[in-house]
Amino acid sequence: MQFLETLRHRNEVLFYFGSISFLMALGCFFLVYLYPIKLQGASAWYKPFKFWISSGLLAYTMGWYLHYLGQGPNIKWYSWGLVFLLLVEDIYISFQASKGTLSHFNKTTHFHEFMFGVMGLCAVAIALWTAYFGLLFFTQSLPQLEPAYLWGIRLGIIVFVVFALEGLVMGARLAHTVGAADGAEGLPIVGWSRKHGDLRIAHFLGMHALQIIPLVSFYLLKDVKWAISFGIIYLLITTFTFWWAMQGKGW
């Protein structure tokens, strides 16, 4: 596949890590049926499944974008740093799933509390480090990029960073559901509550703005004004989704 070959050429580190992440996600999906473990009413393997997919998408996406900024040492440091930070989270989440034990919001022991804090620090580090490269897309001259696509990348990174840090709200609350306890019946696989507020929905939309806004800007909009407008509308919708969840309202 031409895309994968181009991605490998652009950033081998993130290409191989992303590919491994997708394979790990596939393994977790099979474990849902081969090694069934329940946690809060659903398969414990759904959580690492989602996180491995998210890690693969982030690795592939940033590997693609970073190519436009050159091949300097800051790119290599970020690439390896991203791999390390994501692995800390994903391996621990998978380990906890194998025991049928919560990884997030778990303060039942000193170890669990410490690891919950470590995961939070990893998430913040990823967001802020990515924000730095987002700034470079504003400050560097990138004439090889179509203006609408460039603005799509800029706005995609901004929304990504904002809603990656939204995880701090969930961490402070020690829950992602508003108006009920975590673990109530929700949508298949993702588990989002339909009856109560669920902060994971805005988190998901914001994190994947990193892919959606640039792709729409590049393939559909092809105009700076439309790209900026779409990015702002996307941000407003995601912000509204967060506010709605904070009111404890479902969909």
Image (spheres, rainbow, N blue to C red):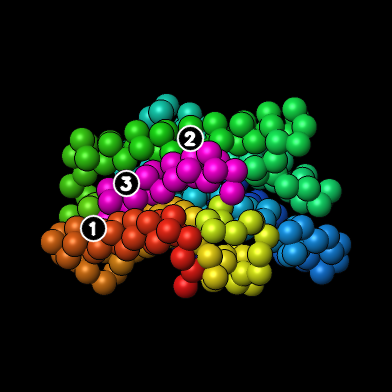
- The CA span between labels 3 and 2 is 14 Å
User: What residue does disc 2 label?
Assistant: 124
Residue type beneath disc 2: Val
Residue type beneath disc 3: Ile
Which residue does the image show at 49% across and 40% down from the upper left? Answer: 168
Residue type beneath disc 1: Ile
Which residue does the image show at 28% across and 36% down from the upper left? Answer: 136
> Which mark is drawn over residue 232?
1
Taking the magenta stretch, the answer to whether it contains residue 215 is no
Q: Which residues are magenta?
A: 152-175
Instruction: Tell me the SS state at disc 3.
Output: helix
Q: Of helix, strand and loop, which mostly describes the magenta segment?
A: helix
Q: Is residue 114 visible?
A: yes
Query: First in sequence: mark 3 or mark 1?
Result: 3
Residue nearer the viewer, 24 or 230 = 230
- Tell me residue 111's x, y (percent): 75, 29
Question: Left or right of 14: which side holds 129?
Answer: left
**For the view shown, which residue lies furthest in the right direction?**
35
Taking the magenta stretch, the answer to whether it contains residue 165 is yes
> Which mark is drawn over residue 158?
3
Question: How many numbered circles are shown?
Answer: 3
- Tell me residue 38's x, y (percent): 80, 61
User: Which class describes the residues within 10 Å of circle 3: few (<14), some (14-19), or many (20+)?
Assistant: many
Q: Which image quarter: residue 49? A: bottom right
Query: First in sequence: mark 3 or mark 2?
Result: 2
The image shows residue 61, relative to residue 80, as above or below, that is: below
Instruction: Tell me the SS state at disc 1.
Output: helix
Question: Left or right of 16: which side holds 62?
Answer: left
